[in-house]
Image (spheres, rainbow, N blue to C red):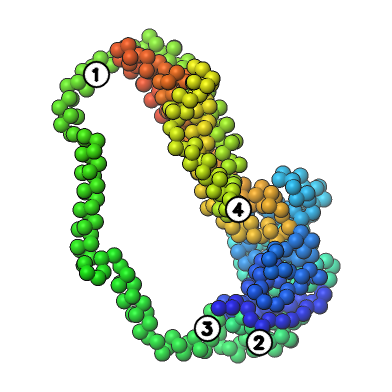
C-alpha cells in the first residue's frame, strides 16, 4: 500500500500552502517526504534547490533551508525549554563537537522567541513538565530560531487555544520578514481560509484539489466528514459491509493456532506442561542430591553454630570498621571505573544507534565480562598484581562493566526516537544527536543503574577478601577459619548496618533521579 501516489506540485517562494484532508489521507507523509524523512520509492523530491536522493538523508545544508515542526512536538523531555530551542541552531556548529557552547546571540534570540510565545516563566523548566500547548510553542520557537527558508508544519496549533493559535500562525507568516515559504497541515478550516494563499486537498494519498483556499475547504466539506476523521474510501466501506463474517473467520483461525488445539484439548496441553515442569525439578533435585532431611536433620548443628556467634565480640569493632571503609573505597572506585569503561561499549551495543558489526562485538565483550564471577576475577588479579585491595578494585571493575554495559545499552534502546528525528531535521550530527537526544533521556537511568551497581559492589567487595583481594571479607574469612564466630558475628552485623544504610540512600537517590 502506498502512502502517497502520483503526487506532483510546485510551490513558489513566499507562498503559504495549507494541506487539508481526512486523517490518514497522507498529509503527514507528504510533509515527511518534503522534509527528507520519508524516502520515495519512485520520483524526485526537490526542495529549496536540494534534490533528496533515495539512499541519503537530509544534509546540513538542506537543514539550513528547510525546517520541520512535528505533530508530536519532537522535544527532548529531559532538556529545558531554552536548550530545546537552542538545538534549532545545531547545524551552525561544529558537527564533531559533542558539547556545544551556544553563542550569546543565539541564547538571546531563543529567550526572546520564548517570551514572545508566552513562555517567559518556563525558560528553565524541563519540557516533560510543560503542558501540551507549551511544548508546541517550544517546538515553534525552535523552528523560528532555525530560521529556514521553507517551513513544514504538521498541525502546529492543534494543542493551542484560540489566542495562541492566532498569534502563532501570524508569527509563522512573518518568518523571514514574510518571505518564507510555508506548507502547513491544518484541521481548522477557518484558519485555512484566513491565512492560506493556496490549498492542497489530500485524499487517499493523492492530491485531489490544488487551488483557492475557499474552494478547497468547500471540497472537503462536500465529503461530509470532518478533517480529523479517518480516510476510508467508499470502496473500504462497501468491502466492510459485504464481509461481515471476516472477524469471525479470523477468530476461528486464531483459535486453531492456540496451544493445545488439534489432537489434544487445552486441558491435556496444560496437564502435560505442568508434568514437564515437575519432571524438570525432580531431575534437578536428583542431580544435585538435594535432600530436605539433611537440612532438618542437622538443625542442632545450626543452633550450636548460632550459639557460638552470640553474643558478638565488639572488641574488633575498630578493625572491622576500618576494613568496611576500605570496602566502600573499593566499591566506589571499581563502580566509577566500570561506569566510565562500559558506557562506550554500551553505545556500540545499542541497536538503535550502532551498526550491526559493532553491536555483535560489543555484546560479546559484555557477555565475557559477566560470565566470569567477581571472585574469579579477584583470583586472576591477585595472581597478577598481588594481595590487597587493588586486585579487588580491578575485579569489581571488570565484573561490574559487564552488567552496567548491558543495563546501559538496554536503556539506550528504550529511548523515545522522536526527539532524535527532530534533531536530525535541524542538522544535528550523530555526535550531537547523542549528546542532546540520547544522553539526556538515558542519564537518569544510567545514574540509577550505577547507584544500584555501587550498592551491589559493596556486598561483592566483602566477599573478595576470601581470596586476599581486600575488604571486610578478609576478616570474616579469617575469623571463621579460626573458629572465632563471635568476632565474625560483629563483622557481619556491621556489614549489615552498612548495606542497609547504602540501600536506603541509594533507593531515595534513584527515586529522585527518576522524578
Q: Relative to residue 227, is residue 425 drawn left or right?
A: right
Q: Position of residue 36 (x, y in %)?
A: 70, 67
User: Residue under circle 3?
Assistant: 232
Q: Name the N-terminal-most of marks 2 and 1.
A: 2
Q: Residue at x 49, y 86 (%)?
A: 236
Residue 32 shows up from this direction: no
User: Residue under circle 2?
Assistant: 208
SS for tag 2? strand
SS for tag 4? loop
Q: Position of residue 70 (x, y in %)?
A: 65, 65
Kindly report the distance in space between the C-alpha atoms of the residues bearing marks 4 and 2. 41 Å
SS for tag 1? helix
Kindly report the distance in space between the C-alpha atoms of the residues bearing marks 3 and 2. 15 Å
User: Residue under circle 4?
Assistant: 355
Front disc: 4 or 2: 4
Query: In the figure, residue 427 lies in which quadrant?
Result: bottom right
SS for tag 3? loop
Q: Name the N-terminal-most of marks 1 and 3.
A: 3
Front disc: 3 or 4: 4
Front disc: 1 or 3: 1
Asked whether disc 1 touches disc 3, contact meaning CB atoms under 8 Å apart, the reply is no
Residue 281 shows up from this direction: yes
Q: Relative to residue 375, is residue 57 drawn left or right?
A: right
User: Residue under circle 1?
Assistant: 305
Image height of 121 relative to 23, above or below: above
Kindly report the distance in space between the C-alpha atoms of the residues bearing marks 2 and 1. 87 Å
Kindly report the distance in space between the C-alpha atoms of the residues bearing marks 1 and 4. 57 Å
Amino acid at each position: 500500500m502506498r502512502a502517497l501516489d502520483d503526487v506532483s506540485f510546485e510551490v513558489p517562494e513566499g507562498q503559504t500552502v495549507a494541506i487539508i484532508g481526512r486523517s490518514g489521507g497522507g498529509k503527514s507523509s507528504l510533509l515527511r517526504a518534503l522534509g527528507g524523512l520519508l524516502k520515495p520509492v519512485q520520483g524526485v523530491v526537490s526542495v529549496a534547490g536540494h534534490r533528496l536522493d533515495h539512499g541519503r538523508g537530509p544534509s546540513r545544508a538542506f537543514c539550513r533551508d528547510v525546517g520541520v515542526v512535528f505533530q508530536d512536538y519532537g522535544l527532548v523531555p529531559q532538556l529545558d525549554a531554552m536548550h530545546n530551542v537552542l538545538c534549532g541552531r545545531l547545524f551552525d556548529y561544529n558537527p564533531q563537537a559533542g558539547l556545544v557552547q551556544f553563542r550569546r546571540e543565539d541564547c538571546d534570540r531563543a529567550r526572546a522567541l520564548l517570551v514572545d510565545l508566552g513562555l517567559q516563566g518556563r525558560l528553565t523548566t524541563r519540557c516533560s513538565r510543560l503542558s501540551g500547548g507549551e511544548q508546541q510553542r517550544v517546538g515553534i520557537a525552535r523552528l523560528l530560531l532555525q530560521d529556514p527558508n521553507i517551513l513544514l508544519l504538521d498541525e502546529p496549533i492543534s494543542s493551542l487555544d484560540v489566542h495562541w493559535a492566532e498569534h502563532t500562525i501570524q508569527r509563522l507568516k512573518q518568518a523571514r520578514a514574510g518571505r518564507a515559504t510555508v506548507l502547513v497541515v491544518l484541521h481548522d478550516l477557518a484558519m485555512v481560509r484566513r491565512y492560506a494563499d493556496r490549498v492542497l486537498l489530500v485524499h487517499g494519498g493523492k492530491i485531489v484539489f490544488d487551488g483557492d483556499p475557499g474552494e478547497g475547504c468547500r471540497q472537503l466539506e462536500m465529503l461530509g466528514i470532518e478533517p480529523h476523521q479517518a480516510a476510508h474510501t467508499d470502496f473500504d466501506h462497501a468491502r466492510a459491509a459485504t464481509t461481515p463474517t471476516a472477524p469471525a473467520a479470523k477468530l476461528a483461525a486464531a483459535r486453531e493456532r492456540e496451544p493445545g488445539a488439534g489432537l489434544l484439548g487445552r486441558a491435556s496441553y496444560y496437564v502435560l506442561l505442568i508434568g514437564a515442569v515437575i519432571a524438570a525439578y525432580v531431575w534437578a533435585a536428583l542431580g544435585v542430591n538435594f535432600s530436605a532431611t539433611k537440612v532438618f536433620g542437622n538443625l542442632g548443628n545450626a543452633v550450636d553454630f548460632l550459639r557460638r556467634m552470640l553474643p558478638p565480640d565488639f572488641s574488633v569493632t575498630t578493625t572491622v570498621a576500618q576494613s568496611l571503609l576500605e570496602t566502600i573505597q573499593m566499591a566506589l572506585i571499581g563502580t566509577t571505573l566500570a561506569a566510565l569503561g562500559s558506557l562506550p561499549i554500551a553505545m556500540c551495543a545499542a541497536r538503535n544507534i550502532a551498526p550491526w558489526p559493532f553491536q555483535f562485538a560489543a555484546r560479546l565483550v559484555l557477555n565475557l565480562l559477566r560470565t566470569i564471577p567477581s571472585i574469579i576475577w579477584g583470583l586472576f588479579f591477585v595472581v597478577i598484581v598481588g594481595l590487597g585491595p587493588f586486585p579487588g578494585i580491578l575485579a569489581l571493575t571488570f565484573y561490574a562493566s559487564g552488567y552496567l554495559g548491558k543495563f546501559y545499552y538496554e536503556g539506550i534502546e528504550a529511548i523515545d526516537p522522536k526527539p532524535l528525528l527532530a534533531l536530525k531535521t535541524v542538522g544535528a550530527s550523530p555526535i550531537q544527536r547523542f549528546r542532546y537526544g540520547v544522553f539526556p533521556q538515558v542519564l537518569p537511568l544510567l545514574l540509577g543503574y550505577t547507584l544500584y551497581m555501587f550498592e551491589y559492589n559493596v556486598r561483592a567487595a566483602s566477599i573478595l577478601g576470601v581470596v586476599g583481594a581486600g575488604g571486610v571479607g578478609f576478616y570474616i574469612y579469617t575469623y571463621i577459619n579460626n573458629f572465632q564466630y563471635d568476632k565474625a558475628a560483629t563483622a557481619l552485623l556491621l556489614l549489615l548496618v552498612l548495606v542497609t544504610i547504602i540501600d536506603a540512600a541509594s533507593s531515595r537517590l534513584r527515586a529522585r533521579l527518576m522524578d
